[in-house]
Amino acid sequence: MVDMSTTLGARRLANPLMTASGCAANGQELHRFFDVSELGAFVTKSVMSEPRSGRGTPRMAETPSGMLNSIGLQGPGIQAFVEHDLPWLASVGATVLPSIAGGSATEFAHVAAVLRSSDAFGCVAGVEVNISCPNVANRGLVFACDPLSSAKVIALVREQVPRDVPIFAKLSPDVTDITAIAAACVKAGADGLTMINTLLGMSIDTDRLRPHLGGVTGGLSGPGIRPVAVRAVWQVRAAMDEGRMPTVPIIGVGGVRTGTDALELVAAGASAVQVGTASFNDPTAPVRVLRELTGLLEEKGFATFDEVVGIAHGRQGES
Amino acid sequence: MVDMSTTLGARRLANPLMTASGCAANGQELHRFFDVSELGAFVTKSVMSEPRSGRGTPRMAETPSGMLNSIGLQGPGIQAFVEHDLPWLASVGATVLPSIAGGSATEFAHVAAVLRSSDAFGCVAGVEVNISCPNVANRGLVFACDPLSSAKVIALVREQVPRDVPIFAKLSPDVTDITAIAAACVKAGADGLTMINTLLGMSIDTDRLRPHLGGVTGGLSGPGIRPVAVRAVWQVRAAMDEGRMPTVPIIGVGGVRTGTDALELVAAGASAVQVGTASFNDPTAPVRVLRELTGLLEEKGFATFDEVVGIAHGRQGES
Amino acid sequence: MNDLPTQPVSAARRARVVQEQAELVATTRVGAYQHLTLASPGVAGLARPGQFVALAVGDESSGTLLRRSFSIHKVTPGPSSNGAGGTVEIVVSAVGAGTRWITSRQVHDRIDVVGPVGRAFPLPTAPVPCVLVGGGYGSAPLFWLAGELRERGCTVDIVLGAASEDRLFGVLEARRSCDGVTVTTDDGSAGVKGWVSDVLPDVIDRRGAGVVYACGPMGMLRAVSDVAAAHGAVAQVAVEEAMACGIGICMTCVMPVVGSDGLTRMVRSCVEGPVFRGDRVRWDAVTPTGAVVPPDAVGAPRAVTR
Amino acid sequence: MNDLPTQPVSAARRARVVQEQAELVATTRVGAYQHLTLASPGVAGLARPGQFVALAVGDESSGTLLRRSFSIHKVTPGPSSNGAGGTVEIVVSAVGAGTRWITSRQVHDRIDVVGPVGRAFPLPTAPVPCVLVGGGYGSAPLFWLAGELRERGCTVDIVLGAASEDRLFGVLEARRSCDGVTVTTDDGSAGVKGWVSDVLPDVIDRRGAGVVYACGPMGMLRAVSDVAAAHGAVAQVAVEEAMACGIGICMTCVMPVVGSDGLTRMVRSCVEGPVFRGDRVRWDAVTPTGAVVPPDAVGAPRAVTR
Ligand SMILES: Cc1cc2nc3c(=O)[nH]c(=O)nc-3n(C[C@H](O)[C@H](O)[C@H](O)COP(=O)(O)OP(=O)(O)OC[C@H]3O[C@@H](n4cnc5c(N)ncnc54)[C@H](O)[C@@H]3O)c2cc1C
Ligand SMILES: Cc1cc2nc3c(=O)[nH]c(=O)nc-3n(C[C@H](O)[C@H](O)[C@H](O)COP(=O)(O)OP(=O)(O)OC[C@H]3O[C@@H](n4cnc5c(N)ncnc54)[C@H](O)[C@@H]3O)c2cc1C
Ligand SMILES: Cc1cc2nc3c(=O)[nH]c(=O)nc-3n(C[C@H](O)[C@H](O)[C@H](O)COP(=O)(O)O)c2cc1C
Ligand SMILES: Cc1cc2nc3c(=O)[nH]c(=O)nc-3n(C[C@H](O)[C@H](O)[C@H](O)COP(=O)(O)O)c2cc1C
Ligand code: FES
Ligand code: FES
């Protein structure tokens, strides 16, 4: 039996498989298909300070091996989240990585503060900070597109979250140099990084010759973007290995559908893997991927998951 | 019958369909499947000043609805290109958009100068400047990732190419703000823009747990990236419409496989469309897409192709 | 906060759902549609009229990732005479790549099915007269519903409408399972030339119907809701929003619906619908191309841009 | 600059090629492989031994974009007895998603075929003794070649090798179409236990063979090239590089090959190969996982990083 446990900052998780934020709601729906406490961690839909209606519809467009979404961060607000969703997750024994978002750095900090003070905070193994969302003050530019805005959010959130609870900055791939953003976040106090959020994309309704999505542009996800996720994880891990930034754990996400896909991210440097869009195709995907990944490592004769994290580095050019 | 002709700078083309650079070699191979003079323009593989061997193999990895390539700009060099390839294209009556590349701005200028002095230059309807290639002086950073490097290349090439021959800057999507690069190129003298080149991606060989490609990272192309191409064309066209930069024609490329796909790019603002990876699946794809696009416009009752260029702008939010 | 007329959502969330590789046991052409019978005992054992199934398209390496949703036309629970498990029937209109793939499956092929999903048609507790309205393949789930209603002592009238005769579904079955049948077509190729909403007032009034159940295109559902309200009946309408997951985890399928607290929320039509009370849907915010967020909805953007 | 031993590339480029929707007319299991017969009259009318076909995988909406290449095992040109056009046969080992899709096609299904592609085995102008060497399914194109060689008066010996008996292809056919047959398996489950290169020297020497034709894994081709050279024979080897297009437009399938000017270039194995003269391939730069660019190749990077 392979030891599948993995370490994320101060926390050790039973296994590296997680849901991806926004692709699993807050647990009750998927719990009908599998026991969500079997996951290394359950990542919740990004929650903001107030309830949000999200955008109009259509909110999705199907694309080859992927989809576009423009949900607009619909959610109940942090108060309802800590009153209903988090206690439910705690009640079924789930390990939780709440994802938080905000339109300003102070909104992020406020959400983190309410979260920390929740009675159910004990089930929280870390906080994912979704900085791939629009900064209201900066013409709606995504925080994660700018190292300074990113750092500010992370620093304020870090102050609110207890030291022994790691925080993860979730990065956008839509930048010229993702290692620069990654380094800024770690410097500001991020204990780890989640990569990647969706790519900015768009589709045209060719019947009506107008943008397909109510929100015009949307986030591209699914297997088609996996090569971008693998590359991002690889680049940031390489920057760590080369001493260009401190080494922190990476959570890989983007286009994972099978155990082999997950293994790509792990070998590139991810200490944990999230499954997003694939769950829409197969609701049991997160636990199926865990099973498949475990099987693959067993076949290959590894004793622990840890050995495989980043294993592909230094292997290029071998024959 | 729909008038499918389109205007690109000083030139009018019979139709908007083109091959994509590097996805059609230099014409002879595809001419066995269809008459390459039927295309609006034939775009050749990016050529540099000297012959280049390209990279080792594997040079490709298949990905969901796409592929990665790391060819490494293999080619015969500009001298052989003007002696053999361009005259052959001229001899079959093709309209040509040679694509040029370089490791420095002066290499680009040199390639453009040799091209201009070619006897067969008469068949050239424009020059595509592939600035999505590594800048040797700048740690191999791609020119198109930096507005200044991009502008320098464009300015030097513009000096070498006759005024009545438009030059097109081919942009990379791997940037935080593609409109900034687009604006820099147009300011430096680009008569038009080609969008998009491949996305930087990577895949891991999960048998050997090492990077799959000889070149480690590679360029992601194919239908999976189409939403990114549509978004890039949309954003830059919107910047033009809003007066944030001068209006120049856009050539759309990225993931086009069908006439409907091409229509997405056109409605988003492209005056011409290139077909790349889809040709590997169907060698007749460029002319098939032309046929399908023409049919679609006919069905919809358009008299001219021109009317459809950018038609989706200003239509969002209508019901 | 998720309260809805007849069934609290928490119940819907807890409602059992299965995923199974269903064998296609029969597939026949019916007018413009394909009628598929799937051996899907898990779904068959749980489903109620108005619920739907979500089918995966293609195999593991398919480039088409999202499931396609179809109303359950009929279920035959329990082991059938030939020893096979229960079956689930659906009626599919091939409109795009996904439905073309599904309708071209052959007997013995397997299809990955998730179901039953969604909130079923709520049944009246007293034997009131009911009218069912089906537009095109929207009639598919209504015959099963008719049977259940008549078992409860309700009189059942049905109105079937479509663009043309070949797009009507189940006229014969309607005559068997309902007390009265009215047919309309836009082109007059069968029944009354016109829309279901043209004949509906009469049908409601004639029986003094208390509930109108409807399934079909959004425009029709709105008209049915209006007519029902004007004629003193409660409308229960099954909507069709574009769905990415069908099981409540993606938030793509939302509709603006008024809760029992009087507040409008963007609710998921896959788990909190597809059946909504017609007078609870904010039709003013539903356009032919999608729903906008009403400015008074809970959490609506301060400045609405759309 | 593209010159190659027997056939200038410009000719290969001009060589006719067709794309057609071929109907699968037969598919049978043979050991570890699937033997497919396609009604592909255009390809059948043009093909020569050593050429291959490139098959598309899945339908229009398939997420698998790239074609898969297969050596042509046999062609039957012209209208066949039942009035159908010519057929093309291939032998497929199901190793991944694409080949699994291809091998699970049923009779009457259509497959999009491009072919014939590539440079055929060059035939000797004089009746010299020849040895054919096939590794695994690599023997598929050799029986057809054997026939052509014997028509020209050549004696033909064949060596068939594989990991185990079920991975041998065409032992019976070999006995029909060749003058001598030697079989090797790694595990000794059939014929001589060992590799083809163990028995090859003897076979060459026995007949005084002038040409060795080989098709199979890269390592085997290298060994065959070495043995042939050591025993005074010319090797003609059909290589298998990963190919994205199969028709010369993508530059993914390159191999380091020495031209008649003595210079090494990275040449496309789909149009300038797949058959190369064994002594022209830069085996020193070919590794089990891919080819590196020899530092002396035309246009090689100044500082080789790999
Ligand atoms: C609750 C529900 C019940 C349904 N019941 C039936 C039924 O009984 N019979 C039937 O024929 N059809 C039914 N539909 C519609 C059916 O799901 C769509 O026609 C189908 O999804 C179209 O898929 P496609 O690949 O053929 O079309 P495409 O246009 O290629 O689909 C592209 C994308 O848009 C989505 N989409 C397109 N049209 C619709 C639509 N009308 N509703 C929802 N999503 C759509 C698809 O799911 C897919 O993600 C139902 C839809 C819903 C939501
Ligand atoms: C000239 C030529 C002739 C061939 N003849 C035969 C034959 O007669 N019978 C037979 O069974 N196979 C043959 N092959 C190998 C066959 O093309 C591969 O096994 C097949 O492409 C694998 O596809 P897949 O989807 O099953 O595997 P996957 O591993 O899923 O393929 C992934 C990608 O890698 C490429 N790839 C993987 N393995 C190979 C390989 N060995 N060679 C080239 N590309 C590969 C695929 O084309 C695809 O793009 C030949 C290959 C070439 C180049
Ligand atoms: C419908 C949908 C909603 C999403 N919502 C969120 C979100 O609220 N917060 C977040 O950080 N990421 C969100 N994401 C991004 C995913 O968490 C994930 O980063 C991305 O989809 C790539 O992974 P995938 O390809 O496995 O889906 C969303 C993605 C989808 C498809
Ligand atoms: C194998 C391959 C080689 C390419 N070579 C070049 C090149 O030499 N110059 C260039 O500008 N773009 C090159 N491209 C990028 C394409 O021209 C195109 O921009 C990109 O592939 C997106 O379009 P597609 O999805 O239609 O392929 C290449 C793409 C591929 C797949
Ligand atoms: S379809 Fe995903 S939440 Fe309804
Ligand atoms: S496979 Fe494309 S050039 Fe050979």
Image (cartoon, coloured by chain):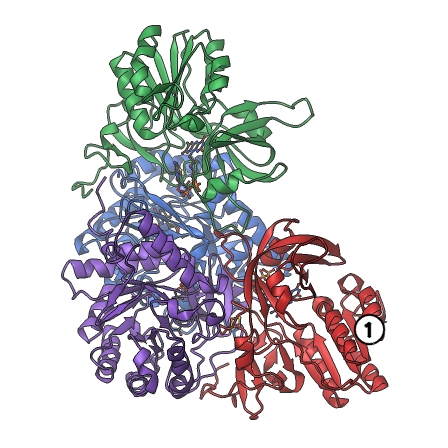
Chain colours: A purple, B blue, C red, D green
Which residue is rendered at x = 25% and y = 62% of the image? Answer: B146
- Which of the pair D225/D31 is nearer the observer? D31
Q: Residue furthest bottom?
A: C261
- The image position of residue C32, as x and y in percent, is 73, 58
Q: Secondary structure at mark 1?
A: loop
Taking the image in four quarters, ligand 6 sits in the one at: top left
Q: Left or right? Give the position of A144 relative to D170.
A: left
Which residue is rendered at x = 38% and y = 77% of the image? Answer: A46
Q: Residue furthest left?
A: A243
Question: What's the chain of the residue with tag 1?
Answer: C
- Which of the pair B81/C243 is nearer the observer? C243
> Can residue A227 be seen by looking at this rendering?
no
> Can residue C156 be seen by looking at this rendering?
yes
Total of numbered circles in the picture?
Answer: 1
Q: In the displayed structure, would residue D195 be above or below residue C54?
A: above
Say what amino acid the circle numbered 1 marks: Cys
- Which of the pair A152/A316 is nearer the observer? A316
- The image position of residue B217, as x and y in percent, is 29, 51
Residue ID for mark 1: C178
